Amino acid sequence: MSFDALFSPIQIRGLTLPNRVVMSAMGTHMPAASADGRSVTDQMIAYHVARVKGGCGLNTTEVCAVDAASAPTAFLSVADDEHIPGLRRLAQAVHEAGGHIALQLWQGSLAVSSDPNAEKLIPSRISTWPAYRIPEMSEERILSVIDAYGKAAARAVSAGFDMLEFHCGHNYLPHSFLSAAFNKRKDQWGGSAENRMRFPLECIKAIRANMPEDMPLSMRVCWQDDQLKDGLTPEDVIDFCKEAGKLGVDVINVSRGNTVTTANYYEVPPVDLPHGFNVEAAARIRRETGMLTMVCGRINTPELADEIVASGKTDMVIMARAQLADPNFCNKAKAGQLNSIKYCIGCDQGCYDRFHKSLTDSSIPHISCLRNPLLCQENSRVLSPTAQPKKVLIAGGGIGGIEAADALHKCGHKPILCEEGDHLGGQFMLAGKAPRKGDFSRAVEFAIKNIYDEGLDIRLNTPISPELIESEKPDAVILAIGSSPFVPPIPGHDGENVVNSHEVLAGREVKPGNIVVIGGGLVGTEVAEYLAHRGSHVTVVEMGKAILGDLGFPRRVGTQKAMKKEDITVLLNTACRQITDSCVVVETAGKKKELPADTVVMAAGSRCRDTKALQETCDRLGIPWYLIGSAKEVGFALDAIRDAYDAVLEINK
C-alpha cells in the first residue's frame, strides 16, 4: 500500500509540510533533568530528531509554560528569555534533520499542582475542586497572563519555531475560562458565552500579534466537556472555533477529556477506547467552520490514518504514541514495511502511567514505552551494528524472546529462537484474546511475521535443555521462558470444575452458568468480562480492598466501565476457603457463605518458571546468560521487553 493521502504535502500559510502526520505535545518529564527543571536537554533534542529522521511531518514540543510564576518543574517553559537558547537549539536540530516543529503555548491551571511552588490559577472557585483553597484570578492577573502569552509567542518566534499551538483544552486555564463548568465569574470574564470566550480570544490576539503573518497557528480544543455539569457542548466548541478563526487560528486540533473527572482517560486513550474515536468530531468542526483540522485518538496504523485523510474528514492526523513506540513509523509505512513497525497497543504503561509516577518519584527520569524501551534514550542507549557477530540461544518465544531476537538480528548477531510450543507469542498473544485487547494480538502477530521475514532461525516444539546448550555452544543465552499460573492450595483446587485463566483465554470451552473467578487483578477481571459477555453470571473474589490494583488510571477506568455493562459481581476483602463441585466457600469479615459455582477460574497470579538447570549449564560452560521478563520476576510485558533490550545491549558490547 502506498498511503498517498497520508504522505501528501499540505500548505498552511507559509509553511509546507511534507505529509499529514503530526506528533502532538506529550509530557516526557525530560525537562526535569535540566539545570532549572524547565529547559530543553540534549536528550530531548535527540528524541525529536529521531522522529524527524523517521519521517514525521510535524513535531510538537510538549506543553510549554508561558507564565513564570505558574510554570511547574518537569515541564518545558518559554516564560523567560533565558529559555530561548535551549529552545533555539531544539528548533535548529529539527531543521538540520530536515523537519518542522511547533511549540505549544500552555498555562496549566490546576495541572501545575505537581509543583507546590507553582502558582495555581483558576477563573473562579467552584465545588469541582473542593480540595483546593485557591482564590479566583484577579483582573490584573488575567491581563498579566494574556500578556505572557504574547511574550511567549515572541520568544518562540525568536527561537525559530515553524508553527505555534495554543492549548485551549483539557481544563487548562483557557478552557477553564471558556467552559461554564469551571467559570462561574460574574464580571466581563464570565457568565455569557461571549464573556467566557473573552479570555481565550484575548490570548489568541496576543499570540497572533507577536507572530509573522505567514506563520501558522493551531489550537487544541476538547470536542465537548465529558462528565461535567454545565460543560461545553459540541455546538459551543464550534461557535468558539469560528471566533478563533477570525482572529488568525488556522488549524483546530481536536481532542477530548479533562483532568478532574474520569473523562481524563480520553486524553491518553487506552486500548479500551475505539480507534479514531474523535474523527467524526473533527469532521464536523471542519465542515461547519471551514477550517483545517487535525485529529488524535487511538490512530495507530497507517491504514486507518490514510483512510481518515483520504475521506476528507480531517486534514492531518496525530500519530503521537505511534511514534513513541516506533520513531521510524512514517518511513516504514511509506516504504510498505508494515510488518516491521512496532505498533502502539494503547497499554498506557510507559507513557501515561510512568509520567504520572515520575511527578512524585524522582527515581523515574522520563516516560518509557512497552514497545520501545529505548524511548527518551536515543542519544545514550543505541543498538549499533556489531563487529563481532555472536550466536545467541533464546529460550522462549514470547514477546520478550521475539524482541530480543529481532534486536540481535538488527545488530548483526545470529539469534536462535527456541519455543517449546507449536507457536510464538506466549502470554502477550494470550492477552490479546481478552476483551478490547485485539491490538495486543495484532502487534505480536506483526512482530512474528517480521522475524520470519528477516529469515531468523526459529525452532518451534523445541524446549531449551542443558543438552541443547551443550550441542549448540552459543556465545550467550537469553532465558525468556516466562511464568506459569499460580494455584493457591485451597481445598478443592484440583477439582474437575476448576480451570486456570490462561486456559480460558486460550479457548477452553466453559459452559455458561455461575462462574467464580478467584483473583481481581488484571487477568481475573478480563476473564470475568470475557465469560460474562458469553452469558455467564460471574463473581470475582478478591482478597484485597480493590480490584485492578495492578493497572494504571486509564486502563482501570476503561475496564471498570466495561465491567459495569456485564453480569459481574465483585466481592472485596474476601477469601476463598474451599471449592466443591457446586460452590465456592468464601469468608468476609469472619462470616462464611457459599457461592454457586458451575466453574471456578483460578486467576491468582503466576510464578516464575525454574531455570536453575539452564543457568548451571551455562555457568559450567562459561556461557553468559541473561534472565528476562517473567522468568526473572513476574510483571508486565513492558518489563520483559525492557529486559530483552538490556540483554541485547550487554551482548552487543
Image (tube, rainbow, N blue to C red):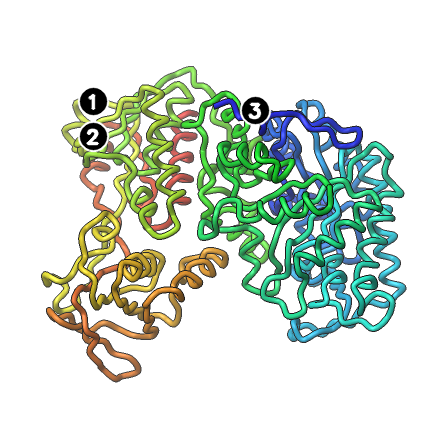
Q: In the rendered structure, which disc, 3 or 1, sits on the residue that comes first in sequence?
A: 3
Disc number placed over residue 4 in the picture, else none: 3
Residue sitting at 31 percent across and 46 percent down? 630
Residue under numbered circle 1: 472
Q: In the rendered structure, which disc, 3 or 2, sits on the residue that comes first in sequence?
A: 3
Disc number placed over residue 460 in the picture, else none: 2
Q: In this view, does 116 lie above or below 2?
A: below
Question: What is the distance, in whole Å, between disc 3 and disc 1 at their CAs?
Answer: 48 Å
Q: In this view, does 156 lie above or below 635?
A: above
Q: How crowded is mark 2: few (under 14 residues within 10 Å), some or many (20 or more)?
A: some
Q: Along the horizontal axis of the image, is 497 left or right of 559?
A: left
Question: What is the distance, in whole Å, between disc 3 and disc 2 at their CAs?
Answer: 39 Å
Residue 401 image offset from top left, x and y in percent? 32, 34
Q: In the rendered structure, which disc, 1 or 2, sits on the residue that comes first in sequence?
A: 2
Closer to the camera, 283 or 510? 283
Look at discs 3 and 2 and give the one toward the viewer: 3
Q: Residue furthest top?
A: 387
The three-letter code of the residue at mark 1 reads: Glu
Q: Along the horizontal axis of the image, is 5 left or right of 456?
A: right
Q: In this view, does 222 lie above or below 442?
A: below
Q: How crowded is mark 1: few (under 14 residues within 10 Å), some or many (20 or more)?
A: few
Residue 103 image offset from top left, x and y in percent? 73, 40
Residue 8 image offset from top left, x and y in percent? 62, 25
The three-letter code of the residue at mark 3 reads: Asp
Secondary structure under tag 3 reads loop
Secondary structure under tag 2 reads loop
Q: Quadrant of the C terminus?
A: top left
Question: What is the distance, in whole Å, between disc 1 and disc 2 at their CAs?
Answer: 16 Å
**Residue 185: quadrant of the picture:** bottom right
Q: Along the horizontal axis of the image, is 602 left or right of 161?
A: left
Do we see residue 93 in this rendering? no
**Residue 252: quadrant of the picture:** top right
